[in-house]
Amino acid sequence: MQQTSNLNKIKILVVGDTHGDDTTPEKRKDNYAEACLEELQEIVEIAHEKQCDLVLHLGDVFHRIEPGPFVRNGYLKILLQSKIPWYTLIGNHDVRHNLEQYYSISSIRTLIEAGALKTDDSINDYGIYLMHHTATKVEECVEGFLLDKEFPVVAAHISITLAPYFGSYVLFDDLPLNQKTKIVVCGHIHDAMEKVRTDGVHFMNPGSVCRKSLNDTNIVKQPQVLFLEYDLTGAIYQKEYIKLQSSKPADEIFKIEEAQAIKDNKHDAQKYIKQISMMSLTDLEEDIYESLKKSAKLKCIEEKVADHAIQTLKALTDN
Ligand SMILES: [Mn+2]
C-alpha cells in the first residue's frame, strides 16, 4: 500500500526570494510594494492553473523583519485567498539574520500565525525537508548535516553555488546529501542556477522574484517561478520555468538613465581627481594659482579641470 502512494506524482511551484517591502529601493522608479503584490498575486494564480499540491517559497518572503503595513497586509490578503497551501522557508532577511532571536517578532510570523503561510522542518507527505537559514548552516552542511535527512527533496535558504562565491558557501558538487535525496531547490542567492551532478542529483535555484538593485543581472532578468512534478522516489516528470507576466521590463522599473548619469559623473570625478593630483607648483616664488596653471599646461591637463581646481582652492583659502 505504501509503495503505491510513493508513486503518486506531486506538483509544486517553487518561488525564490520575494523581499516584499514598503520601501522602494533607491534605483527603482516604480512603486516597489505594489509591484511585489502584483507578482505575488500572479504566482497564486499560476499555482491554481497548474493545479499544484503546494507552493514552496524558498525564504526571504520579506526584505526585513518589519517590511511595513502595506506589503505585509497585502501579502496576507493575497495568500489567504489561495486555495493551495503555501509553505515557506525562513530566510535571513525575514528574521534579521537570526531565526532564534527574531522569529517571534517577525512579520513572517504574522503570516504564519494567520494561516497564510505554513512552515515546519519538513513536509512529510510530499517528501520535502525544509532547511531554514542560520548563520552556521553552510558549515553544518559541509560537515554532513543533511546526511541523515531521508527526503527526496531538500529545500534550502543558504549559499549553494556552482562556482566560488563570497562569504560562506558550499559548491553543489561538494554538498553531502542522503542517498534518498534527488532534488535540491535553493533560494538566498538571487541568480538562477541549475545543475545535475554525476550522482544524478538535480539542483535548481529559480532565482529571486525580486529585483532590488540595478545591476547587470537585473537589467536583463525576467523573474520566474519553477513548476516541478516529481514522486517520492525523487524522479522528475515535469520541470518548467514560468516567467511572470506582471514583472515589468527593467527600463520601466529602474532609473536607468539616472544610474548611467551617476556612473558618468563618477567617471568624470575620478578623471578630475587624477588630473588635479598631477598638478603641482612649478616655482615657489610665483603666485600659487599662476604656478598651478603653468603646471597644468605642462602636464596637458584640460584647462577647465585646472580652472575648476584653482577656483576650488581659491574658495577654500580665501575664506
Ligand atoms: Mn534574499
Image (spheres, rainbow, N blue to C red):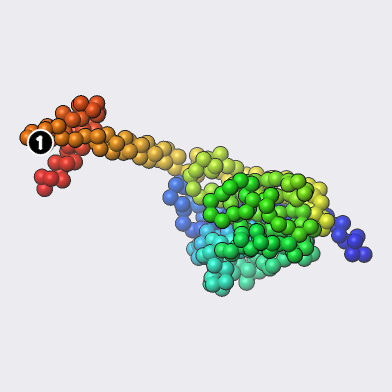
In-image side of 25 versus 179 (left or right): left
Camera sees residue 81:
no
Residue drawn at 56 percent across, 39 percent down = 220
Report x, y in % for residue 280: 19, 35
* Residue 87 quadrant: bottom right
Q: Which residue is mark 1?
A: 284
Task: Report the residue at 17% width, 38% height from top.
Answer: 311
Residue 283 shows in the view: yes
Q: Is residue 107 left or right of residue 3?
A: left
Residue placed at 88% from the left, 61% from the top? Answer: 5
Residue 146, image x and y in percent?
Answer: 71, 62
What amino acid type should be assigned to the residue bearing mark 1?
A: Leu
Q: Quadrant of the N terminus?
A: bottom right
Query: Where on the picture, by quarter, is residue 113?
Result: bottom right
The one of 173 and 107 positioned closer to us in this rendering: 173
Residue found at the far left of this picture: 285
Where residue 189 appears, as percent x and y from the top left, is 58, 51
On the image, the x and y values in percent for residue 297 come to: 20, 26
SS class, disc 1: loop
Q: Residue at x 68, y 63 (%)?
A: 145
Q: Nearer the viewer, residue 202 or 241?
A: 202
Count residues near mark 1 (Cα–Cα under 10 Å), then give few for <14, some for 14-19, many for 20+.
Answer: few
Q: Is mark 1 within 8 Å of ligand 1?
A: no
Point out the residue furthest to the right here: 1
Compared with residue 110, is residue 166 higher up or lower down, i.e. above or below?
above
